[in-house]
Amino acid sequence: MLKLQEKVQDQISTIGIIPVIKLKRVQDALPLAKALIAGNLPAAEVTFRAKDAELVIQYMTRNFPEMIVGAGTVLTLNQVKLAVDSGAAFIVSPGYDEEIVTYCVTNNIPVFPGCVTPTEIQCALKHQLKVIKFFPASQYGGLKTINALAGPFSGIQFMPTGGISLDNLQEYVANKNVAACGGSYMVKESLIDNKDWIEITNLCTKSVEIIKNVRG
């Protein structure tokens, strides 16, 4: 399991930012995927906050195999199974759920649970997880808290999500304790509702440029 977990971690870290997507209409999945790829950001965390998230994952993975597509806001084992059956490459939960983490580890499914306290991080470490979600990042202190937690947990890296924007992306991805960020600013509901695929592509391109400038 750990080799597959590490492979996905490396892919996500190389990309640097994962668009966090909530789609109200399944038919928007393909044009959105095209817009992300056009912006050199072939990745997506499709959240189960929206109905038919598993269909969105299925459409993206089947039509654009070059993308790495995961499932987000996963709260139940049933959602894990739906996501994996639909082609999800990884599972993301907003918090730490022992049942979900144990199931994923046991079944060779890369998983990134949300951990914002030392206790939650220690739970993740028991499963040998080295990259965890940090959500909501801005409300829990952002980089100050991440840096403080990295002190006693030097082997852990974080995926901060919540409050990430073009304005602070550079600061986050430049931090050695950050593997990658999760962001919704390039896939805002208003942009998708207006089918503004060009602006989505532009925001992705700007994000990728920032990451390249920082990480090389």
Image (tube, rainbow, N blue to C red):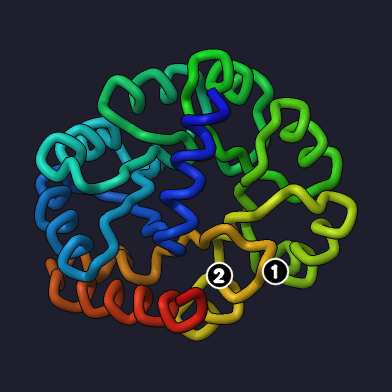
What residue lies at 41% left-to-right and 57% top-to-bottom?
A: 18
Circle 1 Cα neighbour tier, 10 Å, few/some/many (<14 / 14–19 / ≥20) = some
Query: What residue is at 61 percent from the left and 38 percent from the top?
Result: 113
- Kindly check if marks 2 and 1 are in contact, taking CB atoms under 8 A apart as contact: yes
Q: Quadrant of the C terminus?
A: bottom left
Residue at 16% x, 48% y: name it: 29
The residue where tag 2 is placed is 163
The answer to whether residue 68 is left or right of residue 138 is left
Tell which residue pokes out farthest to the right in this image: 152
Q: In the rendering, at what x and y percent does residue 4 appear?
A: 47, 30
CA gap, disc 2 and disc 1: 9 Å
Where's residue 192, x and y in %? 21, 63
Q: In the rendered view, would you say 74 is above or below 17?
A: above
Total of numbered circles in the picture?
2
* Residue type beneath disc 2: Gly
Pinpoint residue 39: horizontal percent, then vertical percent: 22, 70
State the residue position of label 1: 142
Q: What amino acid type is highlighted by mark number 1? A: Gly
Q: Quadrant of residue 38?
A: bottom left
In the image, 196 versus 210, the foreground residue is 210
**Label 1: element kind:** helix
Location of residue 57 (image quadrant): top left
Secondary structure category for the residue under label 2: loop
